[in-house]
Amino acid sequence: MADTFPWPEGKRFALSLSFDDARASCLDHGIPLLNTHGVKATFYVLPHPVEEHLESWRAAAEAGHEMGNHTASHPCSANFHWISPDRRTEDWTLPQMETDLDEATVALQRLLDVTPRSFAYPCGNTTVGRGEQAHSYIPAIAKRFVCGRLFKSEGPVDPATADLSAVFGVDMDERDYADLVPYLDQARERSTWLVLAGHDMCLDKRQGVRRETLEALCVLADGDAWVAPVADVADHILAHRQVML
């Protein structure tokens, strides 16, 4: 575990704010708040909702927010009652998942003129298939992206040793800022990288990041946190690892 890691600007730790699914509240409430504070975040978007609000998502990308891959069809485990039969990862194959990943990338290139550089695993699931026929698709992410983000993880990411294809993502939905302070303190103490993950923005609802929480996180950029998009932090980590070889 790193005692001190050379983060930019002499910052003590890194913090990334990420939001999944391209929900309308990101455009209506969240991105304007981020822009007010000069904070850049990562949005793991789906092609269909992007197309529905195309000009607004283009503006967000042009403003410097990262647009990441979240698959084309958002497949998840059959354990989620809302997943349609055709999107159950237990019934998918690796080629099927790889096709879905690539379709999403092509769509975002067409819609937003960006090539996604990082990925968020839908529902945090990393396998396809069942039982002895189950396979991890983490290698497929490693081939395509600089970083892959998990969900509902338990803590920060060690920049010295972490597998960047499967970095921890801590859930910030429905949480007060005080609930996140222990994670922030751990990242600060150990000079690591905290990746926070949410969905709706500035809404006090299920799968919503509360406005007060988001504002408090943005303010950290004025202190000892390097607040940057996921791919930017991953790039910095990889560059440092290369120097240390």
Image (cartoon, helix red, strand yellow):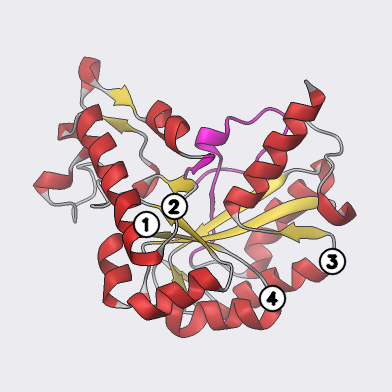
Inter-mark Cα distance, 1 to 4: 25 Å
Contact (Cβ within 8 Å) of mark 1 with mark 2: yes
Instruction: Name the kind of residue labelled 4 in the image.
Output: Gly
Residue at the far top in the pictured view: 132
Inter-mark Cα distance, 2 to 3: 31 Å
Height in image: 207 above or below 157?
below
Q: Residues within 10 Å of mark 2 (few under 14, many from 20)?
A: some
Which mark is on residue 115?
A: 2
> In percent of the image, x 83 and y 39: which residue is there?
5
Dot 4 falls on a residue whose secondary structure is loop
Contact (Cβ within 8 Å) of mark 2 with mark 4: no
> How many marks are shown on the rendered structure?
4
Mark 1, residue position: 109
The magenta segment = 146-173
Mark 4, residue position: 38
Q: Main secondary structure of the magenta part?
A: loop
Left or right of 99, for residue 200: right
Inter-mark Cα distance, 1 to 2: 5 Å
Mark 3, residue position: 223
Inter-mark Cα distance, 4 to 3: 13 Å
Percent across and percent down for residue 35 are: 62, 79
Percent across and percent down for residue 170 are: 55, 51
Q: Earlier in the sequence, mark 4 or mark 3?
A: 4
Left or right of 48, for residue 145: right
> In percent of the image, x 70 and y 39: which residue is there?
237
As for residue 149 lying within the magenta part, the answer is yes
